[in-house]
Image: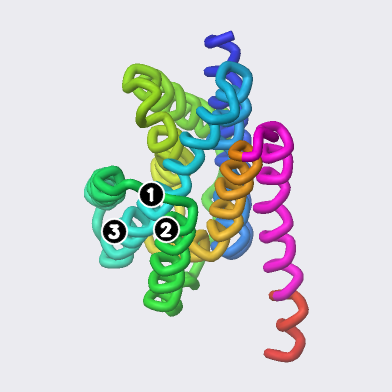
Amino acid sequence: MSFLALILKALTTAVIVVAASLVAERTRPFLAAMVLSLPVSTGPAYVLLALDHDAPFIAEASLASLAGNVAIVPAALAYAALARRGSGLILSYAGLIAAWIAAMLVVRAFAWTTTSAVAINLVVFAAAIAATWGWRTAATPPPARRRWFDIPLRAAIVVAVVVSVILVSESVGPSITGYAALFPASYSSFILLMHRRLGGAVVAAAFINGLIMLVGFTAFLLAIHLFARAGYVWTGILVGLALPILWSAALLAFIRFRRPSRA
């Protein structure tokens, strides 16, 4: 079961990240962000947790995840700021990881309630989206000629990153399971795949657009927590998984509706 769980998380993340990389090569950063911001690794993680743990455990873990969700904001901003300045792959990615760890350590220092966790998400995401509104676009270079091994290589990189994260997270114990489930495996894989191929500015624009998309991911975590607290774990997971998809679809419909008037 443990082996199957590992393969499930790795493959689902690989499929989504490779799809996002293909979208990013051909369209705008907004659409790549839409794909990346789905709960591709956290979703399977909670499905597997629900198979082994009771509702109180899931409720507590999801509350930790909800509070820790804000750590992705300084991480994305750190990467975007460095990448937009022309910093290399290693420095830009190191900035993302350092900012994520620092933010997560700050979050862990507090005792969170549902209300305070939702409030910190609203404040942090609103402030970040407003401050980086002008970073949402970037000129996408012409796609490079794809070699036969490009897509298998991308999938292999993603699987390697996700498996490494899962193996490490399994050794930290249940007390920080909710935090460990939030490691930005999709963002990490996307950076490793696309920073040099498309340029840091394009990847940064995808991440900044992703801040808007991650509102749906926040709703995913909140739904799991609220339903698990009431004893309905699987209902919460199903409702939670639907919310990011509905949020992304609503944003896409809104943009298409606005486009004629802007033209």
Secondary element at tag 1: loop
Secondary element at tag 2: helix
- The residue tagged 2 is 116
Amino acid type for the residue under numbered disc 3: Ala
Between disc 2 and disc 3, the foreground one is 2
Residue 73 place in picture, x, y as percent: 38, 58
Q: Which residues are magenta?
A: 230-254
Name the residue located 61 percent from the left edge and 25 percent from the top edge.
50
Tell me, yes or no, whether the two marked residues, 2 and 1, touch with CB atoms within 8 Å: yes
Between disc 3 and disc 1, the foreground one is 1
Does the magenta portion include 246? yes
Name the residue located 24 percent from the left edge and 45 percent from the top edge.
109
Magenta segment's dominant SS is helix
Residue 52 place in picture, x, y as percent: 57, 16
Task: Name the foreground residue: 167 vs 93.
Answer: 167
Task: Name the foreground residue: 239 vs 78.
Answer: 239
Amino acid type for the residue under numbered disc 1: Trp
Q: Specify few, some or many for label 2: CA neighbours under 10 Å numbering under 14, 14-19, or 20 or more.
A: few
Task: Name the foreground residue: 166 vs 105.
Answer: 105
| Residue 78 circle label | 3
Q: Earlier in the sequence, mark 3 or mark 1?
A: 3
Q: Specify few, some or many for label 3: CA neighbours under 10 Å numbering under 14, 14-19, or 20 or more.
A: many
Task: Name the foreground residue: 25 vs 237.
Answer: 237
| Residue 112 circle label | 1
**Residue 139 seen from this side:** yes
Which image quadrant is residue 30 in? bottom right
